[in-house]
Amino acid sequence: MRDAFHEELDAINNKMVELSHRVNKAIEQATHALLTADLALAEQVIAEDNQIDEIQHALDAQTIDLMARQQPVASDLRALVVSLRMSADLERMGDLAHHIAKSARMRFPATAVPPELLLTIQEMGAAAAKICKKTSTVISSRDTVLALELEKDDDELDHLHRKLFIALLDPAWPHGIETAIDMTLIGRYYERFGDHAVSISRRVYFMVTGEYAKKS
Amino acid sequence: MRDAFHEELDAINNKMVELSHRVNKAIEQATHALLTADLALAEQVIAEDNQIDEIQHALDAQTIDLMARQQPVASDLRALVVSLRMSADLERMGDLAHHIAKSARMRFPATAVPPELLLTIQEMGAAAAKICKKTSTVISSRDTVLALELEKDDDELDHLHRKLFIALLDPAWPHGIETAIDMTLIGRYYERFGDHAVSISRRVYFMVTGEYAKKS
């Protein structure tokens, strides 16, 4: 049977998984809103970002409270420190989904993404969601093999990001500067979303092994 | 006389101030390298980012070690948790300076910034450095009034950021998409740099008062 400390740690971990599910829903909905100019859905993602922030605050308060009451050392302390960092990454991923939803809202009733980039952005959104789902599994399972795998998934997102830039830099690009700026920022948001997911997986690796994963 | 715990906390705080000075040097040098196409200086900023990362790792290890040995509660624990978060913000600010230096290197021997935007980028660099210097003071003095003031300084940076977009969106913009993409990303790096400085000042406010500062 788990002792009181580890039961509370499990509860924190479960909430972290729930937070990651909300972030996943946010990035999926933000991508959908962006691709289909769905204003109501964009507004929903923007509104629900507050809930993500609130869950993070509550989670951190619970983590710090557990630190104060149980005064853990060694790997138990490490788990709580890592927990604070993972929640910060997830909160930031929520912000990035929120930024994407705001881009969708800003261009409504037009679609922010020009037709020839719809597929690339759809793929970036799908890659980001895939990474986020794996991140949830890494958080819940503490699977270090899967944690390392996530860096390769992020390479896929980086590849799509480069593809986006190639399209923007095509001399035949017909959409002008404003759309290029939008797409540059949107591409950046997806890229950073992936980076934070990789951070989380590296933190889990560190928490379990006590060592930093080598940079791929 | 300070007890052993508070002496160690002071030592951590002093290192945090030193880290912020390095970040300030990085953003000043990155801006200079960007504006003058100074490749050697850009390379120096890129190389020295590793040192910033190493200082952060050492600082976090010391903070976690102090948590484990002294098992602080209440405001002492809060100070250590905030310390971990501030070092993460400073490390990220170092990354952003590093990104700006890489933009300078990528366009060498050309200047990444077109002539009509040199002044705006110079002002953004100066505003970022000013905010970073104030952040150092907030960290060392724990001055909550100065901490709140930093949000207003960041508004100045946001104003310059909007000015940058207005220039990019001028129908007479003569520099094409590639330069617009560069300037969009560089503008974003300065903006995020300021955001992290504001985060740090809000964390100091929370550490001292136990309350979250109201969003301005």
Image: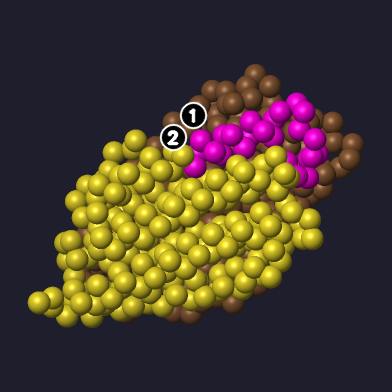
Chain colours: A brown, B yellow
**Residue at the spot 60% in from the left edge and 56% down from the top edge:** B31
- Residue B75: quadrant of the picture: bottom left
Provide the residue designation for mark 2.
A48
Task: Provide the residue span drawn in magenta.
Answer: B157-182
- The N terminus of chain A lies in quadrant: bottom left
**Residue at the spot 46% in from the left edge and 39% down from the top edge:** B156
Left or right of residue A214, residue A181 in this image: right
Name the spot of residue A57 as percent of width and height, x first: 32, 48
Residue kind at label 1, given as amino acid type: Gln
- The C terminus of chain A lies in quadrant: bottom right
Look at the image and say whether residue B175 sits in the magenta stretch: yes
Question: Foreground: B52 or B125?
Answer: B125
In the picture shown, does residue A141 fall above or below A176? below
Question: Foreground: A97 or B48?
Answer: B48
Callout 2: residue from which chain? A
Left or right of residue A104, residue B76 in this image: left
Name the spot of residue B6 as percent of width and height, x first: 18, 73
Marks 2 & 1, CB-CB < 8 Å contact: yes
Look at the image and say whether residue B152 sits in the magenta stretch: no
In the picture shown, does residue A137 fall above or below B66? above
Residue kind at label 2, given as amino acid type: Glu
Q: Residue furthest left?
A: B1
Name the spot of residue B95 as percent of width and height, x first: 55, 62
Left or right of residue B106, residue A79 in this image: left
| SS assignment at label 2 | helix
Callout 1: residue from which chain? A
Provide the residue designation for mark 1.
A44
